Image (cartoon, rainbow, N blue to C red):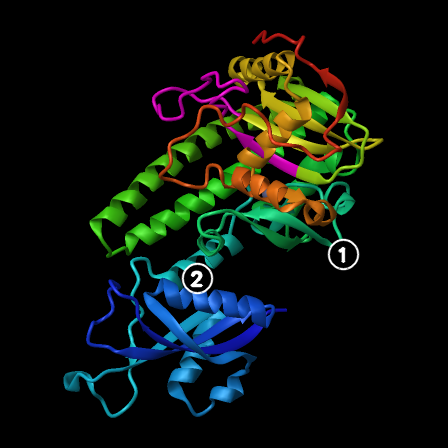
Amino acid sequence: MPQTYFVMFETSPEPGSAIDSRIDGALAHVWVLESDPTSAMIKASYKVRQAGWKIDKVETQPVAVDRDDFKNKDLGLKSFDECQQDGLSLVFVGYTDAEELHTDEPQPVPVVSEINLHEWLSDQKKIKDGGKCLFYDVTESCCEVIDAHSIQRGQALSSIDVDGYVYSPSLSFGDIKKSKGKASFARTHINSFSTFRGLCMFHDNLVFQAIDNAPLKPTDEQAFLYAYRSILKQLSAKNFVVESLRNQLSRFSGSTATRAFMENSLKGNGMGQQYLEREKSHFDESHRRGNFSDIRYVFFRSKIAPTVVFSGGFFPDWGFNGEPIQDLGDFTGDRSSMTFSFAPTEDSWGFLFAWHRSSDEVCRYFISTLQQSIREGQNLGNLLFQLVVKGCENTAFSPTWIEALNDDQKSELIEAMTYGSDLLKAPDGSYLTGGLEAPPDWEFTGVEDNLKRKNSA
Ligand SMILES: [Zn+2]
């Protein structure tokens, strides 16, 4: 259960920040809803710096507080209540030698930042708690959206967790900044890992029973459902990004450079959203008719206990030898989509590529570049592992495995996890070549597919 922590810092304006230059310093009062004092401290100090202030001293370490502590303090009470609403509230009480700024009462200094983080955070929370059921036939039950798991908790996550926890890549704005532009590992409970608010309970159960309650054989239906769920999760995440960007832009009043960057980002994400909606409509149509044979899959079987589980999808851009596959900068044509999933089997697990027949041409070519790479002596496990780490945030690592890695292995993994997170960096056509050293369980004993099926319709 999160509780309210109060933290206080002595701060001074960061040189070059937008804070009134006549202000010498301020006491930053922070109320933050967090699960523990350490997380409270990290979040509070990050937000203070983000607002343009340098922390000179920690005045009060995080202490748990309740509403009564601020009973007779207007500003304190207001901030405490705001924090319950938005998860965080900040008040800077400034001091200055400039006479014209002097007042009888201590005055809060406005929080200055190009993007209003306070609004932004509360926005994120509102959108995240919202969501909608993306199933094609809307029924009354659809208003009860749940935190649907995109990776099964019972069959998959619980096979690698330690005390209910796994490690996953964190590419959140805050964590990236903290780790100096790199991704980092977040310790996450399997109850909340990889969930998305894109299905109601009724449709989640109805549609995905055949994979949630049975190991992969594989059948067409199972492969179809793994891919379908990946598309729903991707679309749900994209909807979230687009809505959040729209909200931010609607009240943005910062520099034109930042506005242009945000508008560009909205345009790119909006296109991605359209492509995913089109992809989903192909799956919807097949599902409605019960045409599971519209799925194409390639399945690599392993017999060793897993250490990494994942579920992702992407628009293939480059092959495993750097072959150009689709130009993602070109928004004029259609776009083909590929999914890949960890799938539990009767005797262990396997790696499942699956795509709709409408994406067949591109995806077959993508798979052929994998075959070519293996013929040239590359290791299959390493190639697939690299694809997962570079192409998919929705990945959980076994804590036992991560903690046993040496520093070099760890930084190599972090480097790969960071790929794609820098929005200003051009895509690298060779990102799938070579291969990252995979965990020992990425050894495959067999491959099965249904590619003999030709597109007739
Ligand atoms: Zn529904």
Q: Nearer the viewer, residue 381 or 221?
A: 381
Q: Is residue 385 above or below residue 14?
A: above
Dividing the image into four quarters, tell me where ligand 1 lies: top right
The image's mark for residue 428 is none
Q: Based on the picture, tell me whether residue 158 belongs to the magenta stretch.
A: no
CB atoms of marks 2 and 1 within 8 Å: no
The C terminus lies in quadrant: top right
**Residue at 45% across, 24% down:** 429
Q: Which residues are magenta?
A: 310-337
**Residue at 74% across, 54% down:** 164
Q: Is residue 423 left or right of residue 155?
A: left
Q: Earlier in the sequence, mark 2 or mark 1?
A: 2
Is residue 136 in sight in this rendering?
Answer: no
Q: Based on the picture, tell me whether residue 336 belongs to the magenta stretch.
A: yes
Q: Main secondary structure of the magenta part?
A: loop
Query: Where is mark 1, residue-wise?
Result: 163
What kind of residue is marked 1?
A: Asp
Which residue appears farthest toward the right when viewing the image? Answer: 347
The image's mark for residue 122 is 2
Q: How many residues crowd around disc 2 within 10 Å: few (fewer than 14), some, or many (20 or more)? A: some
> In the image, residue 288 lies at what x, y percent?
61, 27
